[in-house]
Amino acid sequence: TVFVEGALPSETCLVLIVKTRKHFGYGKLLEILSPSPDRREPCCPVAKQCGGCQLQHLSYAAQLAYKTKEVQDDLERIGGITGVTVRPAIGMEEPWRYRNKAQFPVGQGKDGCSVGFYAKRSHRIVDTKQCLLQNERNDAIVALVRDFLNEFQIPLYDEETHTGLVRHILTRIGRSSGEVMVCIVLNGKRLPHSEVLVERLQRIEGMVSIVLNVNREKTNVILGRKIITLWGKDTITDSLDGIEFEISPLSFYQVNPVQTEVLYKKAVELADLKGDETVLDLYCGIGTISLFFARKARQVFGVEIVPEAIADARENAKNNQIENATFYVGKAEEVLPAWVEEHADDGDAGLHPDVIVVDPPRKGCDEKCLETMVAMAPERIVYVSCDSATLARDLKYLQGKGYEVLRVRPVDQFCHSMHVETVVLMSRK
C-alpha cells in the first residue's frame, strides 16, 4: 500500500515513491493522468498549503461517502466489530461558512504580521485573508487586528524563542444571537494601545465582548486560565434547539451549531427515552448534551473535569429553567464511584443509570472510566465520538464486557476536513 496525499480513489497518477516500509510506503503526487469524476478545484486559494482543509479537492457527496467508509473500516479493523452497517453520514445542505469559532495563530511574516492557520504538518503560518469555513465577520476581524498589530508594531510571539507578545486571535460568533467575541491571547498581561483596538473592534456588527487571555507557558496549548475583559460582556450567548448557552473563551462548545443540533437530536433519539430514566453524561462540558437529554429524562447527572465548564453548565441549566440536571466537577473515573456510593440507598435507578452518554476528547475514554461504566451496568450507552479510531478501540472494550453495537451514524461536523463525528448506540446483552 502506498499513501499518496492529494490523490483520489480510481485515479491514475504519476507518483514518486519517497519512503518505503515493510508493508506500506509514501508517494508524492507528480501528475494526475486520469482524474476522478469526484475531483473538484478547491474554492480556497491556499487550500493546498493550509492544514485546515484536507478534502476540498473532493466533491461533497464523495466526502460523505469517504467518511462513512472510514468509520466502517475502523470499526471492523480496530474494533473487530462486524455485522453492523454504518448508516450514511449526515451532511449539510450548505457546507461552507459553518464554523462559529476560529483560533488564528499570529507570527512575524516577510511583510509584517502573519495571521492565518498552520501549514500542513508544521507550525509555519499561512497568512490567510479569508477562510471559507468561518463566519464572514471573521475576515473583517482578522484584517482589523492585523492592521492594528502592524500599525503599532506590537511584538509577535515566536514559538522557538518564547518571546513576543501576541500569540493568537480567538473569535466566537453566536449563530442564533449574532453576538461576537474577540479574544487576544498574550504572552503577557497587557496589550499596548488596547483602547485603540477596542474602539475599532466595536465597529464590527454584533460585537459584545473583547477580552484578553494570558498564556505565558511554553506550550502548544492555545489558552491560559486567566481572562481580562477589556470591553463588554465576559461571554456571548447562543442557542441550540431552543436551549440557550453562555459561552466564555474557555468553554468547549461545538464549532458547527447546525450539525450539533442534528448530532444531539440523533443521540437523544438513539437513547429512546420514555421520561422516567436516569442519564449520566460524562465529559459534559458546559452541559450541552445534558440539557438536551434533560428534556426527555427524569434526571441527568453531568461530569466534567474543568471547574469553569461545570460553573457554566449549572448556570445554563438555571437560565433555561431545567431543574433535573445536576453537575459534578472531577475526572469521570473518580467521580463515578463516589456517585454510586452517594446514591447507593436510593433504591431505584440512582445506583445504575439507565443510560450513559459519553462524549470524550479525541483520545477517547480513559480505561478506568470504561471500567466504571461497565460496573454501573446501564441498559444503554450512547457514545458520541470525534475520532473513529479511538471510538472503535473503546467499543471493542465495551463489547468484550457484555455490550453490543446496535446503530452507528456519522454526522459531518467538519466539512472539507478529514474529521467526522459519530454517534453509536450500544445495549447490554
Image (spheres, helix red, strand yellow):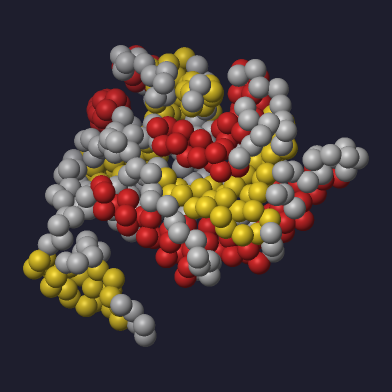
347 vs 150, left or right, is right
- Residue 23: give x, y in percent of width and height: 36, 82
Residue at image location 28% in from the left, 75% down from the top: 2
Q: For this rendering, which residue is in front, 103 or 317?
A: 317
Residue at image location 17% in from the left, 43% down from the top: 43
In the image, is residue 9 above or below residue 331? below
Which image quadrant is residue 186 in?
top left
How many labels sit on residues? 0
Locate the C terminus by quadrant: bottom right
- Residue 5: give x, y in percent of width and height: 25, 64
The reply to whether residue 419 is visible in this rendering is: no
- Residue 22: give x, y in percent of width and height: 37, 85
Residue at image location 65% in from the left, 41% down from the top: 281
The reply to whether residue 325 is visible in this rendering is: yes
In the image, is residue 399 above or below residue 312? below
In the image, is residue 293 above or below residue 365? above
Q: For this rendering, which residue is in front, 187 or 235?
A: 235
Q: Residue furthest bottom?
A: 22
- Residue 121: give x, y in percent of width and height: 33, 58
Which image quadrant is residue 68 in?
bottom left
223 vs 173, left or right, is right
Locate the N terminus by quadrant: bottom left
Which image quadrant is residue 295 in?
top right
Q: For this rendering, which residue is in front, 362 or 274?
A: 274
Residue at image location 42% in from the left, 52% down from the top: 87
